[in-house]
Amino acid sequence: MKRNKGTDTPVAQQDHILIFGLGFTGLRLAKVLEQRKWKVSGTVQTLEKKREIERLNPKIVVHVVDKSLANDTSKQNELFEGVTHILATAPVNRSTGKDPILEMVGDVIGLLAVNGKLTWVGYLSTTSVYGDHKGGWVNENTETIPTLKRGRLRKQAEISWLGTGAPVHIFRLPGIYGPSRGTIARARKGTAKLVVKEGQIFSRIHVDDIVGVLLASIEKPNPGRVYNVVDDEPEANYVVTGKNEC
């Protein structure tokens, strides 16, 4: 803990979240935490995206990263300086089948965890890890038997994150909707497609509800926990689309 110059009075460390992937959900959380006086930083893949986010959100520190980060100690030090919380939103690397963040900086995250630097880590996974339950209900205690490749890769990514030794929390998400995104948004624009498949139903979640769950977890960490962040009104695609076309 830092101390005031010339005194023994400890200075509380500012909460600092590093969000890997300032996309639809990551940026939404970043804005809320910045308003709460957190230090917020995050990553993007292009300089254009960095400039776009910084133009609208000048207090959010944006880093452009790529696979070269794995061997760039200087960039790693800059990226993780003072970080107390981490959110990982990136999908599995299609080329390697592994989590891209852990591929690049898994060792760094593990070291931070060993040294007690991290208070909370969140990993955004998907409900595809459960596999096909024929429309039946699942909960966090249901065995994960993914039937699709992407579900199997996500399951392995969850295991890898939990194995870092960091205070990891897993959030399994269904289809995400919100401003200008999702079936409802497409229906209102007239671009939605009706998908009719007997027995096929889905849960969904609004991006702001995801943010609410993440904030609650940050406030009361419970490392190792898995959360299904979904609504309780699963419905078929054609029903949701039809309702919002009316």
Image (spheres, helix red, strand yellow):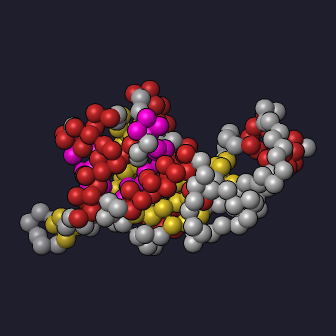
Tell me if I can see residue 195 in this picture: yes
Circle count: 0
Residue, x 31% and y 64% (percent of image)?
165
In the image: residue 150, left or right of residue 117: right
Does residue 153 lie above or below 54 as drawn? below
Give the farthest residue toward the left: 6
Residue 141, image x and y in percent? 57, 72
Whether residue 78 is in magenta: the answer is: yes
Quick check: can you spot residue 37? no
What residue sits 21% from the left and 37% below the top? 72
- On the image, the x and y values in percent for residue 246 come to 91, 43
227 to the left or right of 122: right
Q: Which secondary structure class fits the magenta region best? A: loop
Q: Position of residue 222 (x, y in %)?
A: 43, 73
75 relative to 161, above or below: above
Q: Quadrant of residue 185?
A: top right
Pick the front one: 155 or 11: 155
- Given residues 167 and 158, the one toward you in this image is 158
Q: Quadrant of residue 67?
A: top left
Q: What is the magenta range?
A: 77-96
Q: Pinpoint residue 97: horizontal percent, then vertical percent.
A: 44, 42
Foreground of the two, 37 or 242: 242
Instruction: Assign the N terminus to one quadrant of the image.
Output: bottom left
Q: Is residue 212 left or right of residue 188?
A: left
| Residue at the image position 34 percent from the left and 34 percent from the top | 66
The residue depicted at 29 percent of the width and 47 percent of the height is 105
Q: Residue furthest right?
A: 246
Residue 115 belongs to magenta span: no
